[in-house]
Amino acid sequence: MSKILDLFFLLIVCNVIPFWTETSLSIPYKIEITIVFVFLFIVDLIRNEKALLKNFRLESLKRGTSLIWLSGVALIPETAIVVLYFINTDADIFPKILSIVIPLICLIVTFLSGFIKTAVSSKQIKLKDYILLFLLWWFPVVNLVLIHKFYKTAKKEYIFEADKLELENARAENEICKTKYPVVMVHGIFFRDWQLMNYWGRVPASLIRNGAEVYYGNQQSARSIPDSAEELKQAVMKVIAETGAEKVNIIAHSKGGLDSRYAISTLGLDEYVATLTTINTPHGGSDMVDYLLAKFSPKTLEWIARRYNSIFRKLGDNDPDFVAGVKDLSPERLNELSKYMIDSPNVSYRSCMSCMKNVFSAGFPLNLGYMIIKRLNGDNDGLVWIESAKHGDFRLVTASKTRGISHGDTIDLFRENIEGYDIREFYINLVAELKKQGY
C-alpha cells in the first residue's frame, strides 16, 4: 500500500507545476503551493523506510530500492499523462515543455536518490557492477539491464539480511551458542586478527548475538607451525586466565588448524582444549606448495620473503617468517611434523571442508590455485584439496547452486551472501552442536 501511495504522490509532484500553469490562481499562490510540494518531495526522498527491525542500514537499503522501483514504475503512467496532455490541450508551448521537463527531472532525481541510498547501504553489489554502470549508463537497453541487476541484488540483500536479523533477534534469548567453554577462533596464514578488519567477517558478531563467548588466536601472519603453535598456546592460556574456564573450544581455519594440532599434541595444550574444529585445513599438506616453490629461484623466493616480512612488520607482526610458514604446508614437511602431532584422547577432533565447483567459483588467486590443485590432486577449494582436509569427524560443506564454496568463502572473506550457503548459519550450527554435546 505504501508503494502505491508513493507512486500517487510522485505523479502529483511530476505534474503539479504544469497543472498550475493551466489554472487561474495568482502567481504567489502557485509559488507557495509549488514550494510546499517540492519540500514534501525532498523530505520523502531523504527519509528512510521502516524496516521490520530497527536497523539504519537496512532501512536505508529498503528505501533506496523502493525509490529505484518507484522511478521505473512511474515512468509508464507519466508517459501516458504527458501524451494525453499534448493531445487534449491547446496550451502554449511553455506549459507543454514544462509537462515534459518537470516530470523528467522528478523521475531522475527519484532514481538518483534511490541509487545513492542503495549504493551507500548495500554490501553485496560488486565493484564491477558500479564500473559497468559508470561506463555504459548511456547505452540503451544495456543500461536498463544493468540497473535491473543492481536493483535485484540490493533487493535480495535486504530480504536476506532482514530475515537473518529477525531470526537472530528471535532466538537471542535461547543463547544457542552459549557453550560451556569459550570459543577461540584461530586464523590461517597471511592474515592477522585485526580489530578493524575481522578475519572471520560477519561470523563472530553472529556467534556473539547467539550467546557465544568469542576470543582469537592472535598468532602472527606467517611463521613455522611450531612457532605459531607457541603463540597460540599463550593466547589460549590468557583466555583461561581471564575467563576462569577449564578449557576452550578451538575453531581453526587453514594453517591455523595445524598450529592448533601442534600446540595440543606437543605443547601440553590438550589439558586446556575440549574440542578442535578445523575448517579447510591441509592436514595432509598441499602439493601446490611444492609445485609453486619449484617455479621460483632461491633469489626470487628470498626477495618475496623480504618484501612480505617487511610489510607485515609494519602491520603488527614482531617476527614474520614467510618462507617457514609456506614450507611447513608441504606434504613432506607435514609428514615430518605429524610425528609430533598425535591426536590427544582428551580432545574431540572434527573437520570441515568445502569445494569449488569450477574455476569461476572464485577470483584470483583462488581460481589459479583451483586449476593447479585440480590437476595435481582433484577437487579442492582453491588452496586445499578434499582428502587433505580430513581429520577426525569429517563433513563436506556444499552449496545448493553451481557456484561452490572457496577457501575464502569459509571465513566470509568477501562478506558475500551465497545462495544455498549461509556462512553465519554454518558457524552458528557448529557452535550450537558443541553446546548440545556438552562442550
Image (cartoon, grey):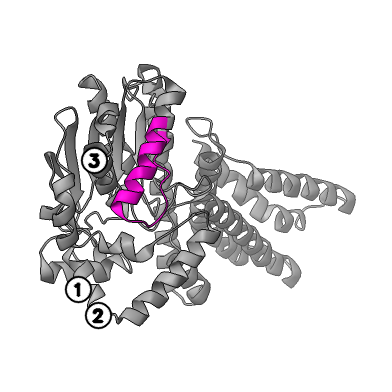
The tag earlier along the polypeptide, 1 or 3, is 3
Residue 217 within the segment the image draws in magenta: yes
Q: Residue 206 appears in which quarter of the rendering?
A: top left
* Distance between mark 1 and mark 3 Cα atoms: 29 Å
The tag earlier along the polypeptide, 3 or 2, is 3
Task: Between label 3 and label 2, give the one nearer the viewer.
Answer: 3
Residue 115 within the segment the image draws in magenta: no
Query: For the residue labelled by badge 2, is the local secondary structure a helix, a strand or a loop?
Result: loop
Nearer-the-camera pick, 277 or 73? 277
> Label 2, on which residue?
295
> Label 1, on which residue?
291
Nearer-the-camera pick, 315 or 134? 315
Q: Name the spot of residue 127 as percent of width and height, x first.
A: 46, 64
In the picture, measured across the screen, residue 314 lies left or right of residue 228, that is right
Mark 2: amino acid: Lys
> Label 3, on which residue?
266
